[in-house]
Amino acid sequence: MKAKLLNGTIVSNHQKVVKIMGEMPVSQTIVTILLVAPPLNFNSRLLSFYRNASYAAGGFVFLVGFLVLSGWLFDVPTLKSILPGLFTMKANTALAFMLAGTSLWLGSTKRESQWIDLLAKACATVTLLLGLLTLSEYLFSWNPGIDQFLSKDLLTPESAHPGRMSLVNALNFLLLGLSLLLPARHPYWRLVEVFSITALLISVLALLGYVYGVSSLYQFFPDSSIAIHTVLAFLILCVGILFAHPELGLMMVFSSDNLGGLMARRLTPAALVIPFLLGWLFLTGQRMGFYNNIVRLVLSTMSTVIIFASLILWNASLLQRHDFTKRKQAEDEIRKLNEDLNERVIERTMALSQANNLLQVMLDYMPDQIYFKDAQSRFIRNSRSQAKALGLSDPTEAIGKSDFDFFPHAQLSYEKEQEIIKSGKPLVDQEERVVWPDGQETWVLTTKAPLRDQAGQIIGTFGISRDITERKRAEAAVQKAKLELEATNKELEAFSYSVSHDLRAPLRSIDGFSQALLEDYADQLPADGQDHLKRVRATTQRMGQLIDDLLHLSKATRVSMKLVPVDLSRLAQDIVAELQGAQPERRVRSMITSNLKAHGDPGLLQEVLENLLNNAWKFTSKREQAEIEFGSKHENDETVYFIRDNGAGFDMAYAGKLFGAFQRLHAMMEFSGTGIGLAIVQRIINRHGGRIWAEGAVDQGATFFFTLPALERAQPKVVPQEKDSLAKRVKEII
Amino acid sequence: MTNQSTLLFSAFFAMTAAGIYSYVGWRLGKRAISSSEARLAWGSFIVWWHGLAATTLIGGVLSLFGAFGLTSLPLFVTAAYLNILIICLALWGLLYYLIYLFTGNRRSLLPLAVFYIIYYVLLVYYITASIPSNVNVGRWSATLAYGAPLTGPFFVIILVFLLLPQIIGGLAYFTLYFRISDATQKYRVLLVSWSIIVWFISPLIALAGGLEQQDWWQLASRFIGLAAALTILMAYLPPRWLKQRYGIISLNDET
């Protein structure tokens, strides 16, 4: 007998009960104990054995049918009748066996597929139709032409319906076809059993006929006999059908682990086989003239009585032992269950008490406001902080009240909570402005979620609110500062634009008129005067350059960026080639690692490389054999690019000043430049989210390192789905 | 050697090979596969091995019959029909395994089944239409002799359907070698794919070169089959020295 628990679980043994109880609340455990009746234990090994046997029976019957049909098609007498002189299995019978075997085999497969099921039913239907049509042939004496459809039967005389399966076979196929066609569930399974057992009994009768030599049992009519291999195939098919669902009907008894199952498995084979064998044995003795009919009857009865009495006694003693052991086991189990239950009750009570204490501590000391409300949005529990904010001295004072008792704007909050109860969806991190009963106005960050009981039903809401008033103020201040900063930046931009244009005009005038003076009045100016004018011109040109660089620096931080893949190696090669072209006399050994790729703005990255490589070129100008290297390395999960030279280098003490605007570590006379290039480089790298730094030593060269994490950000690593699934398949089945 | 001794040798060899194939199938069948899809594909691979064992065994038994003069035509025809049924089942299993492994598509099971049912019908037609007339007891095997053997395009189609899908499948399987990095997987792919390719390509070569009736080829082809099976066994159960040297994992060591 099975017991169904509250959660729908079928309990099949005490161990399972204990296991399931461990996952249930105490109250449910008690109900479970009350509901659990002596369970029906299926023996899983037996279930598996019966199902496998059914599967094999289907295959075997198919094979028998296949071989016999082959015998008919290729005229192999042995396959048709096993031994010469015995009755043949007809081609139609063989086909019906193939179909029934296939249906049973497909029906026993573990795979659930609509197509397989359909095919199994189709095979069963054709089996049934074959039986039905043949029966109709006998009943209505007509011939639809199915008897010799597959093969010509030359062994049977025309008067005896050549090729036609016997009446008994037709009946059996009708019954078994129906058995295979009916759904394997209550109440149809009773019918399946009736049909299969009827066919089984008919086949057993025919088998007895063969064994006892009583031809009337297998040759029911003069023209309608059943072949020996047909009988065996029917027996196996019937048993296979019954075995296909050992958890249903009569087979339940044979599959159970209970005493009934044990008895059934022990006695049924004996009850089936022993009388059969004894009957055959004594009949043979009588036929050989050892004794007459009366003696045979006495011997048979005596032997049956003795054997069955012994069997019954043996089983009774076994049951007695089993019963005693089981009772003791059951008592032990009940005692253990009681002990377990008590322990669990104590454990659960302690756990609940502890959980309650923890919750209370949290509610008392958490600065965030926590509340629990029922389905009508009335408080059922609050944190101390919320009670204080509501103007209450103790959280219990809020119980039974709602927001309407405290807030003028409670309707909106009520509607939100009712929506949560209705939809079951939480509201997470909602910013709300709250006006408290004392008139104070604050901002809170609130999360509200449905409150559920143990069965999962929504019984209210709970929420947590955090005061974010300070944060909101800070955000407002930041926003204000940002707006001010933007305004200032715009003013600065306008200023730098104006500076560049307004300063350029006078500079051009000074330079132009100085040049005019030098050209038109050179003969009237003394050498000192000419030299002074030349100095004026050089200074104005340098100032012009400084203004250009200043504008350039400003542009580097403002120009919009378009991030695309950039081939840095290619850019560096072009720049170095250009530098070499401008100074072909210089001996520079450039080492540029190929295939260095980055993701960034191509124009700005070109400027970075131009500045860094120009510097390297410039500061190695005094080397006999200059060396410039552009490469990359992998450090701390990021790609670090570097440009290294063996030039003048710098003192690391001044490394901090390298990237400042107009900062120079070398004299103008020694190496030309405005000191703006590295400042531009730093701003471009920063705009790409990267970093730049340098290492060097005086007269030992310098190395500039930079990173461009824009690549990683722009191209997140995506593992292709196909490759991933291939890897999974390969791992599993290679 | 007389025909009887070569046939006995052939029968013994076939039965040994059948035992090995069956062992391979049994051994592979013990592997625990977690996902149901992969389990189906792995099961179909095992069907191939058992099918191969069964068809080799039938061949061996027929050789044995031939050696002892049991040459009933109906018996041999029945055996031929049974044999081609098993071959179709085995090929269905192998091809499904290869297709699933390569594409991950499990819906190919039914189309493949339909394909091999049609192929079985074609084979039955081939045998029937060729009119089996006698049992030819050769030096290495006892086979059916046909009254009017079908040749031409039909025979080529039958042959192509028999060998080509497996050769293509084997080659596709081999390409996985370049798509994976794990040493054990690479090792298995290499051994299994080339065993299958060599196995199926060798009869084609023999047919093209007219070697089928040569004694040495008869011996060699049997050894190729056996070597292929042993190679596949070694792919999953590598010898100790390979495990130690290349860190290859045996099926027994898999968790």
Image (cartoon, rainbow, N blue to C red):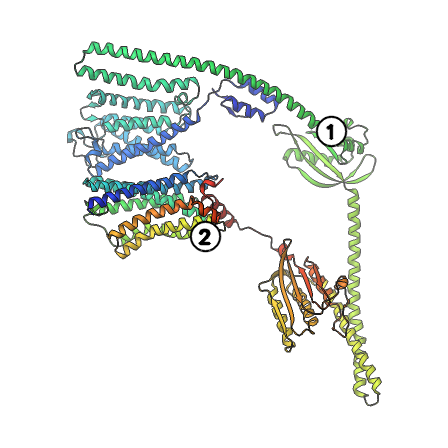
The residue beneath circle 2 is B177
What is the x, y in percent for residue A557? Answer: 72, 62
Chain letter of the residue carrying label 1: A
Q: Position of residue A457 (x, y in %)?
A: 62, 29
Location of mark 1 (residue): A360
Q: Is the same chain shared between marks 2 and 1?
A: no
Looking at this view, is A171 or B98 the one in front?
B98
Report the chain holding disc 2: B
Q: For the point 74% across and 26% down, which residue is it?
A: A400
Q: What percent of the width, then of the height, locates residue A218?
A: 22, 23
Tell which of A532 and A188 is nearer to you. Answer: A532
Q: Residues within 10 Å of mark 2 (few under 14, many from 20)?
A: some
- Vertical placement of residue B108 versus A462, above or below: below
Q: Is residue A240 left or right of residue A322?
A: left
Disc 1, SS: helix
Question: Between marks 2 and 1, how big is the CA–CA gap?
Answer: 62 Å
Identify the residue at horizontal 31%, vertical 13% (top origin).
A307
Residue A571 to residue B248: above or below: below
Q: Residue furthest bottom?
A: A523
- Residue A246, can we see it? yes
The answer to which of A365 and A98 lies nearer the viewer is A365
Q: Amino acid at mark 1?
A: Gln
Q: Which mark is residue A568?
A: none
Q: In this image, A666 relative to A240: left or right?
A: right
Q: Residue at x 20, y 17 (%)?
A: A284
Q: In front here: A54 or B220? A: B220
Q: Is residue A21 left or right of residue A221?
A: right
Count of numbered badges drawn on the protein: 2
Which image quadrant for residue B58? top left
Q: Is residue A18 above or below residue A544?
A: above
- Which amino acid does the dot numbered 2 rest on? Tyr
